Amino acid sequence: MLTQKGVVPVVVGESPNTNGTHHQAAETGTVVAIDVGTTKVCTIVGRKSGTKGIQVLAHSTVPCHGLRKGNVVDVDATAEAVRASVQEVEHAVGHRIKSAFVGVTGAHVGFENRWGRLEAAAERGVIIADDLNGHTKWPAGTSDEPGRKLIHAIKMSYSLDGESGIRNPLGMHSRDLEVETHYVTGAISFIRKLMQAMEKAGVGVDSLVLEPLASGLAVLTPEEKERGALLVDMGGGTTDVVGFKHGHICYTGVIPVGGYQFTNDIALTFNTPYEAAEAAKLQHASTELNVAALDEEISLPIKGSDVLLRVPRLDICQLTRERGQELARMIKLQLDDARIGEPSDIHVVLTGGASNLPGLARLIERTLAIRVRPGVPSVRGTIPEELKDPTYATSVGILLWAATEYVPVTKESNNDSHRGVEAGPKALLSRLIRRVGKLMPYGLFAARKGRI
């Protein structure tokens, strides 16, 4: 496997699983998604439905106390949560879960957009499906920091003979084909702990999936991704941000603020247990101050005391508002950095469990001066009503990615540095172009932008 500057690539479609476990889909026809979050582990079992849909067969959510800000800090606690969640769905579907697609996030995640030359197309002179599906080389200088793992390499657009902005150059003639790729990397030290937790839980990893990318699949419309959209996925420990433009992901970022920080502000300010602060947040908090009457109070227990503290609800809302304003400013910085389009064209979509906080969407909309809407999973197929909530956008998205976007690397394709297996009409077209290209290097398949 290619390494560069300490980077160990795990590319889209390549399994990091080395324990000999077969893919779940190969044995049962089902796929399994596991969202290992800061506050919960959600496991979903499903299968593909149609061309871009899914059918959920079973799901389970259990609390998790092994992560902090999206990173595994307690391998044993994380493994126990994964094991408990998996066992519940095993009971529901009636067979053992051997492997799964696992979400990854955290402040350690980074990205780079890079151009790289596709040498095979240059030698052949005509572009075939293998050129577009094959892995691009991990370019020199992509990461100056050692100890990084490549999670995704997502092709965004192509350039032929210096002309950029081409989305699908299949069949075009060129000896100078370049591809712009969105590389998503993570710190090996953090990813290794996640893999260790999965191994202890007895579940192999088919592939790692960037969680906000998965959320985008579940909640964004094709039109939003085309015109420009910023997906803001608010989890328990972090807020993940991905930008889409021209139908493709182009930006990835992580804000180290999530639902935990809102709760912790209440816990620290009033010296109350975290559990009590969480309950107060869910029942009484809002970023809008006008929801609380001046004389409205709530009771909070005090750590180490049997006395209850009477707290104005307005104080809870004020704390929540201040934290929300800080988060909104950080989202604005991410939006400016993403450069995905004019404000009048962009949509900001909030999802994740923490995005359910009353008033938060309106506060962010006022700060950004851009349209903001809630992101609820909306996919083709059949999913239970309880999963149609921003809390489960990532979990549903991982399953959708596994069922409709993932293409496994076969032994043959891996040797040739290609992704997937050619089959069906596309394979026939690819072989035809390959053969004709050899015989007619300047012939029938030289069409490009109206030039034949």
Image: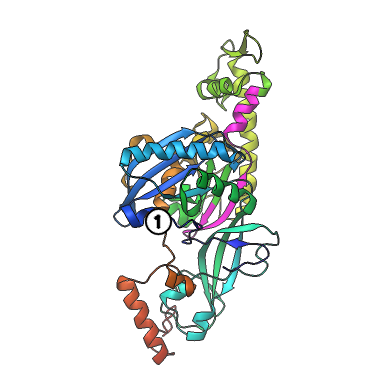
- Dividing the image into 4 quarters, which one contains the C terminus? bottom left
* Residue 4 in the image: above or below residue 71: below
Under mark 1, the amino acid is His
**Callout 1: helix, strand or loop?**
loop
* Residue 406 in the image: above or below residue 261: below
Residue 268 x/y as whole percent: 67, 23
Residue 102 x/y as whole percent: 48, 49
Residue at x-position 66% and y-position 70%: 140
**124 or 12, nearer to the observer:** 12
Q: Is residue 251 magenta?
A: yes
Residue beneath label 1, please? 23
Judged left or right of residue 442, residue 165 is: right
Residue 376 x/y as whole percent: 42, 40
Query: For the magenta stretch, what is the residue range?
Result: 243-267
* Residue 333 in the image: above or below residue 50: above
Residue 388 x/y as whole percent: 38, 38
Judged left or right of residue 114, residue 416 is: left
**129 or 340, nearer to the observer:** 129
Residue at x-position 55% and y-position 36%: 77
